[in-house]
Image: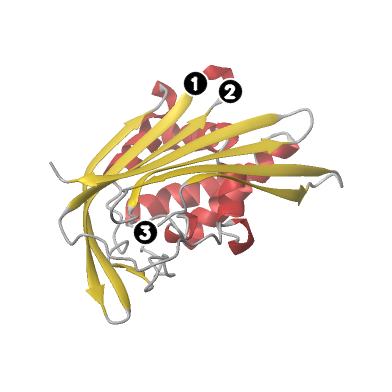
Amino acid sequence: MRRHLIRASAVWLAGSAALMPVAAFSDPDMQSTAQPSGLFQPPQSTMLLTRTLRRPLPGGKQVVTRRSYEVSILPDGEGFRIDGKLVDVAVEAPENLGALAEIERKRPDKGMFPMRLDAGGMLLPGADPQAGATTQEAIALASQQVDSMKLAAFDMLQARAFVGQFQKRQGLSEWPVDLFRPAPGKRRETRTIPLPNGARGQVTVDTEAQVAAQTGLLSSFTRTVITDLGDDVRATYETWTLAERP
């Protein structure tokens, strides 16, 4: 099992196209600063928040992770508190990544809630969730494996970025600050990134948001990240939806 997990870790790290963009997401300069006007008055009913992440792999395959949370947004001081719990996890992955897919299915997202919003509905920084023993083992195995893998520069950069983010457990920093009250419509942000060989690449983040007409609360939020290194272009796709709990 241990050997299988190491091999799976290597494939996951080398092939995931989401790894470099994760570092870009946590940079405040890459997050939208647009903020709708008027009061933020979300309904206090229970809702279902679903986040879907698609990470293409070499050969046309992909890893799809879908996590759903039961949430309530409640007034709290000068802002709001989001209480919630994980209610469903689905992971679609190639068979050789079965071990890591199973870790993702069992990850409980401890420490994610409560989240905090300011008075305008913008997401505030939160404490990092604590990784469990199983996840810590995967991190240790992946860290050992990365330096020994003969990866192209792009894949090595992605792998190291992924392990670094996973070790810090900065799950909340990946979420857009305006997720729960986005400005409707489409936006694009671009960042130039240095590469190990002295060249420069580019990360483009495209977002499209839809909101509930009466409250301005998130209805759907889609983010596409395109990493362009000239001879190597990769993309990842992420979607959040918020709807009344059935």
- Whether the residues at callouts 1 and 2 have beta carbons within 8 Å, the answer is yes
Q: Position of residue 80 (x, y in %)?
A: 29, 71
Q: Is residue 91 above or below residue 36?
A: above
Along the line of sight, which residue is nearer the eye, 148 or 245? 245
Q: Position of residue 112 (x, y in %)?
A: 32, 61
Residue lying at the far right of the rendered structure:
198
Q: Position of residue 104 (x, y in %)?
A: 35, 42
- Callout 2 secondary element: helix
Residue lying at the far top of the rendered structure:
59
Residue 223, visible in the rendered structure: yes
Q: Position of residue 157 (x, y in %)?
A: 68, 45
Q: Residue, x 61% and y 53% (percent of image)?
A: 24
Q: Is residue 181 above or below residue 12?
A: below
Residue 1, visible in the rendered structure: no
- Nearer the observer: mark 3 or 2; the answer is 2
Along the line of sight, which residue is nearer the eye, 205 or 172? 205
Residue lying at the far bottom of the rendered structure:
77
Would you name the residue on which mark 3 appears?
131
Q: Which mark is residue 172?
A: none
Quadrant of the drawing holding the C terminus = top left
Q: Quadrant of residue 156?
A: top right
- Callout 3 secondary element: loop
